[in-house]
Structures are given as C-alpha cells and as structure tokens.
Amino acid sequence: MSTQATHADPTPTLETLREELDSIDQRLLETLRERLGCCVRIGLYKKRHAVPMMQPHRIGIVQSRAEAFAIEHGISTAFLRALYERIIEETCRMEDDIIGSPAHGPGEL
C-alpha cells in the first residue's frame, strides 16, 4: 500500500506536509530578507537626513502590532515578542553600521 496521498485517500503524507513547510519557510526567509533590505534603505535615509538610529516609539508600535497579531491568531505573545526583539536587534545593528559608516556612492552597498 502506498504512503502517498491519493484521490481515494486525501490524507497528506508526512513528506507532502514537510514539502509544504519547506515552501512556507522559503517564503518566510524571503520576506525577512525583504524586511532587512527595507531597513537598509531606512538606515540610508536616516543617515542622509541626520535622523537618530534609535526610535523607541517605533519599536513600541512594531511590538504592539506583533502582540495584537499573536492574540488574534492564538500565537504565544511571548514567542512573537522574542522573535521581534531579535529582528529589531538585527535591524538596529544594520542601521548602526550604515549610519556610522562613510557615505556610500550610488549603487554601493
């Protein structure tokens, strides 16, 4: 008997579920890459316009939105808070590198 899901047996196999998870992970990583790329552009803007890197009110907005999302979708608020703390930590590191670095020429970065 085959372990593959068939038309007669719509139950997914572990393999198909893992393939689905791998696809979701790829989209998650691409979205994270896009988010970090946006943060690079924000860092460049802050540098050009002498805006301080640290914006505590903005961090609060992002954390509150993540917490509301967690509550709405039955996800641990502690988990999403910790996840966003790490993402924000990396974002701040990147922006600090940009703001503290010499000016970049067009196309350099």
Image: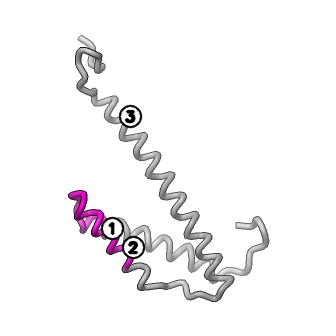
Residue occupying image coordinates x 40% and y 40% = 22
Q: Earlier in the sequence, mark 2 or mark 3?
A: 3
48 vs 40: above or below:
below
| In the rendered image, the vertical position of residue 16 relative to residue 94, given as above or below | above
- Compared to residue 76, the image places residue 10 above or below, namely above
Q: CA distance from mark 1 to mark 3?
A: 27 Å
**Which residue is identified by label 2?**
62
Q: Which mark is residue 19?
A: 3
Q: Amino acid at mark 2?
A: Val
| Amino acid type of the residue tagged 3 in the rendering | Glu
Query: What residue would you read off at disc 1?
Result: 66
9 relative position to 100: left or right: left
For the residues bearing labels 1 and 2, Cβ distance under 8 angstroms: yes
Of residues 101 and 51, the one drawn nearer to the viewer in this rendering: 51
**Main SS of the magenta segment?**
helix
- The secondary element bearing badge 3 is classed as helix
Q: Disc 1 on helix, strand or loop?
A: helix
Q: Is residue 32 above or below residue 106?
A: above
**Which range of residues does the magenta coloring cover?**
61-81
Residue 39 picture location, percent across and down? 55, 70
Q: Is residue 37 left or right of residue 60?
A: right
Q: Earlier in the sequence, mark 1 or mark 3?
A: 3
Relative to 71, 99 lies left or right: right
What's the residue at 27%, 19% (across, down)?
3
* Residue 68 magenta: yes
Q: Is residue 100 magenta?
A: no
Q: Nearer the viewer, mark 2 or mark 3?
A: 2
x, y percent for residue 36: 53, 64
Residue 26 drawn at (x, y percent): 46, 45
Measured in 3D between alpha carbons, the distance from the residue under mark 1 to the one under mark 2, in whole angstroms, is 6 Å
Q: CA distance from mark 2 to mark 3?
A: 31 Å
* Label 3 packing within 10 angstroms: few (<14), some (14-19), many (20+): few
